[in-house]
Amino acid sequence: MKSLWRMSRRRPARRITQKNNSIGGVCRLTYCNPKQIGGILIAKLIVAEKPSVAMSYAKVLGATRRQDGYLEGNGYLVSWCVGHLVELAPPNIYDAKYVKWSIADLPILPQKWQYLVSASTKKQFGILQKLMNRPDVDSIVNSCDSGREGELIFRLVYQQAGCKKPVSRLWLSSMEENAIREGFAHLKPSTEYDALYNAALCRERADWMVGINASRLFSCLYGQPLAVGRVMTPVLAMTVVREAAIAAFVPEKFYTVALTLADGGTASSKRFAQKADAELLLSKCRKEGRVTVQKMERKEKSESPPQLYDLTALQRDANRLLGFTAQQTLDYAQSLYEKRLITYPRTDSRFLTEDMAASLPGLVTDTGRAFAVEEPIPIHVQQVINGGKVTDHHALLPTKSMANADLAALPAGERNVLRLIAARLLCAVGEPHCYAETTLTTICAGEEFSAKGKLVLSDGWKAVERKMLGELLGKQKEPVVLPDVQEQSQCSVAGAELKEGQTSPPKHFTEDLLLHAMETASADSMPEGVERQGIGTPATRAATIEKLVQKGFLERKGTKKTKVLLPTDKGKALITVMPEEIQSPEMTADWETKLLQIERGEMEPSEFMTEINTMITELVKNTEMKKGANALMKNKILGVCPNCGANVVEREKGWFCENRECRFVLWKDNAFFKRLGKRLDSHVADKLLRDGRVRLKDCKSAKGKTYNATVLLSCEADGRSKFSLEFENGGC
């Protein structure tokens, strides 16, 4: 597939031919001046990724007349993609035989890739196709999100629509009006992003091949649907390995002796494996009743301000402090971005570029005022400036628009996420937190006892953090201040006691810890200069976790604020049978390295795709069913079918009766529960099967009111599940 691309109006007419290093997308590019009719420039089409973003562009450009699927005015047409309008075709489009899953038909390796417009987005695609090919449309601006996926979304639509008109690129990090005007005044040639598009196309097609072939291979081998993914499976493997380590951990008891000094502070002995040894020391210390100061050491230390947020760091803090999932945080951040209150959220950079230095002090002042930080805020701009470490987008920031916004009117989740971002800016430009750390070493009964103290010299950025996030941080431990004593002096012992402890197992993964593990996975395998380290990208990690939960491989357990992510029996079984190359993060590390090389023009896309083809072929050829694995792969029994009495087992899309003649099923994507604003999860399904009823709090009516009710489960004549509601207090 060859496409002719033309650049924006500002360049002189010239032809540039670029080496064909694509994989079926953009091959050759032609630059030309825009056509004119009677000396008047005809319409320019702006294509955004989402309707809300398109509205913001239209407002700035003066395109105020609403039409079906676009806005028009002032020489502009502004429309949108609604995410991925054009998607890779399923295997059966290539050959009807692929409808049935069979190992004999593997590997599936398309030679000529095909794309389809999904049924749900067909209307909007039709609108875009018509607009792109309208005679009065002179040129097009790709205004989709500024990143790998945004580039892919637009170009696939452009190609599927059969458009040949010139294209320029809008690249933004902020949705403020000034930033939008500046962006449209300095549109970039689309050709500057060809390599980015090629990398995105390689990633999409390689993921398709791994997902399709590996999922079919293992599903056929083990007789049940198993979803396998290049990113998803290594993440699941990390949780399985962690839980195995926790299960295998054997705690070891240890004992210490703690001495309370009359002059202040508590000194502790070394750890003893045997209680009797610690008790003997305790007895001796009580008899001696004093310690001799061997050494008093004081070191002044400082804690530098934290870096600005990238998306992953924000998601981690929002999970740790607010209990938000990674997906919730991303949704809140995206909404704040579209309301022009923060900059582009899907960033993996934690610094700003040099040209932002001049405007930063004003932004800091406005941010402090918006959150009632009255004290003067020290502003050390250079701490957050490093253009060499900025990738596609700079670090997350609040915008100037935020200073005049009604923050109280924001939903609570958005307001809290905005507070985190604002606090991080104020802290990042602040002064170091300085303190003196003292270490006291004493001798009693021939054994060494030590105590540590801390004296804050200058609060620095931590004072701002407490001001902004005090309630979220919780009660902070007061630092221990040790007495100022002389070496070789003696101190009386006010008290002595035996303390018992035990070694701790590794921690269960919270979303905070799992995001960190995803971010740092295979770091040793990454070459120097790779921006996107770890498994996945900041923009996709949340979706990966959610997909694992939805498919029943992971489950969330714990309190509302602190939930851990645990692999299910199904998840553990999948990893047990999965070959090392699929579950290891090393493959993702290798991919990201090569995708970066493609982005830089250092690797041919065709070379990368050939490697993927070879890997898939070898996987299919060499993988056999593991002995005894069938026992592991059995579906989890949840309860008894209320219709026929057979077992009800969990599968990917719901809980099914094992009796194939019975039609009973509880669908996970359940329309009845959706209408209540609830989700039918394993806990609810278990209650329904065990008791025939489950009480739900805070159901939502069509008018938005909340109420409590009990859902009753029964069966239709043909065995299908039937739900009814029993209201409390006579109604809602």
Image (cartoon, rainbow, N blue to C red):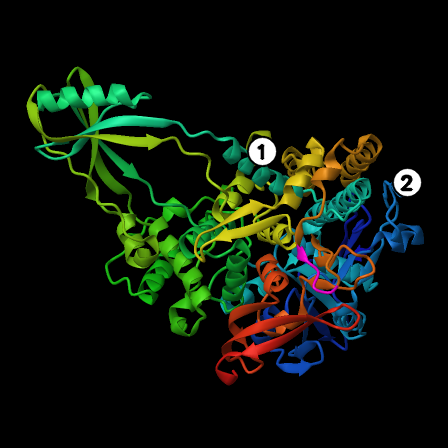
Q: Which residue is mark 2?
A: 104
Q: Looking at the image, which residue sits at the far top?
A: 446
SS for tag 2?
helix
Query: Residue 374: which quarter of the image?
Result: bottom left
x, y (%) of residue 489? 6, 22
* Residue nearest the viewer, comparing 611 with 680: 680
Q: Residues within 10 Å of mark 2 (few under 14, many from 20)?
A: few
Q: Residues within 10 Å of mark 1 (few under 14, many from 20)?
A: some
Q: With 300 as the anchor, is 717 left or right in this view?
A: right
x, y (%) of residue 93? 88, 55
Against 151, is 437 above or below?
above
Q: Looking at the image, which residue sits at the far front?
A: 645
Q: Residue at x 81, y 64 (%)?
A: 161
x, y (%) of residue 277? 26, 19
Q: Which residue is mark 1?
A: 522
Residue 560 in magenta stretch: no
Residue type beneath disc 1 = Ser
Q: Residue at x 49, y 67 (%)?
A: 340
Q: With 535 as the anchor, is 2 left or right in this view?
A: right
Query: Residue 46: which quarter of the image?
Result: bottom right
Q: Main secondary structure of the magenta part?
A: loop
Provide the residue span drawn in magenta.
639-643
x, y (%) of residue 472? 35, 56
> Disc 1 versus disc 2: distance between alpha carbons?
34 Å
Asked whether residue 318 is in view, the answer is yes
Against 269, is 188 above or below?
below
Considering only order in the chain, which callout, 2 or 1, is on the residue closer to the N terminus? 2
Q: With 642 as the anchor, is 335 left or right in this view?
A: left
Asked whether residue 359 is in view, the answer is no
SS for tag 1?
loop
Residue type beneath disc 2 = Ala
Against 74, is 580 above or below?
above
